[in-house]
Image (cartoon, coloured by chain):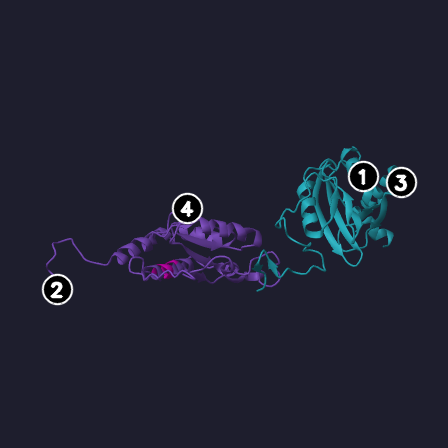
Chain colours: A cyan, B purple
Amino acid sequence: MDPEQEAANPAAEYAERLAERLNERFAGVAVKVEKEGAGDPWIAIDPPRIAEVCRHLRDDPEHSFEWLMCLSGVDRPPDTIEVVYHLHSQTHGRKVVLKALLDRENPRVPTVDPVWKMANWHEREAYDMFGVIFEGHPDLRRILLPFDWEGYPLRKDYEYPETYRGVSNKP
Amino acid sequence: MSPIENKLPDGVLVTSLDTVINWARRSSVWPVTFGLACCAIEMMATGASRYDIDRFGSGPFRATPRQADLMIVAGTVNHQMASRLKLLYDQMPEPKYVISMGSCANAGGPYWEHGYSVLKGVDKVVPVDVYVTGCPPRPESLLDALLNLQNQVIKKKTIGRTRKPIVVEGA
């Protein structure tokens, strides 16, 4: 991206700046900054440290991200499952997108439930749909599907069950 | 000319007990509240003043299955709800009827192929008396289904029905 365009994209500029600030405080925590894609620019955070980074972003008056707008999962076969955090700061009127890129075979990431209470149900949904294990979550159960459901339906390689509790699932 | 014509006093008429019972049953089919999705909005419109389902004796939507004769399954039934639907149906006293309202309840609707969690037709769980097509059906359709059900009720036999003899195996 040439410098003129970059200056015209304040969100990308801010993401770049925030990643630098985070790396100053937590060495090497911001793994990557993506500005080129179609969507919002995002910062990839080292997954085991996501909770402490989030707590810092919430409590530090420089950032003041009081609000977790959305927490979602994305399946990107063959290797990755992403957990996406959309943060918003009422104080500064800013938004930022963080991502934790997880191993698809064993997707584990620390919970941010102690940081933002609303993460509780969102993490349960990400667990329900993608099988992401949120370590330290107080109540990690399925939230939408029945508790005895098998598999994680929003994974790309999910196969529909033919029956559920003896009821045919075919059209 | 029947032999007892003109031999009865005024105000006395002769009929079969079945006709009286069916007349009473047909004229007070009380539905249990079972709105699940957008079809429920049309069901509410059917109950409101413009279409006025009360004209046909089905005005009192009961909040408990124990006081209801009819279950209008209005909306998408998923597997988790299917077990509750069966439970509520089992709690209704006989005689009981089911109207399957709209494409979702009939056959899974738009979710018939890729809706992993959606029941592909409520008739997989409970017996259905009348199916209403539409997505969602207009109130006229639901009223037509109710009249269709009433025509079915009037033909049923309670007193005059023939009972099958009980045969004990190996006796």
Label 4: which residue? B66
Task: Give coordinates of residue A44: x percent, y percent.
Answer: 82, 48
Label 1: which residue? A53
- Report if the CB atoms under discs 4 and 2 are less than 8 Å apart: no
Marks 1/4 same chain: no
Q: Which mark is residue A157?
A: none
Amino acid tagged 2: Pro
- Report if the CB atoms under discs 2 and 1 are less than 8 Å apart: no
The residue at the far left in this view is B7
Task: Give coordinates of residue A19: x percent, y percent.
Answer: 84, 43
- Report if the CB atoms under discs 3 and 1 are less than 8 Å apart: no
**CA gap, disc 2 to disc 3?**
106 Å
Label 3: which residue? A27
Q: State the residue at coordinates (51%, 54%).
A: B38
Q: State the residue at coordinates (82%, 41%).
A: A49
Q: Quadrant of the C terminus of chain A?
A: bottom right
User: In the picture shown, does residue B157 fall above or below A11?
Assistant: below
Amino acid tagged 4: Arg
Comparing A45 with A65, the one in front is A45
Does residue A79 appear left or right of residue B22 in this picture? right
Q: State the residue at coordinates (63%, 46%).
A: A143
Marks 3/1 same chain: yes
Label 2: which residue? B3
Marks 4/2 same chain: yes
Q: Secondary structure at mark 3?
A: loop
**CA gap, disc 3 to disc 1?**
11 Å
Count of number-bearing discs: 4
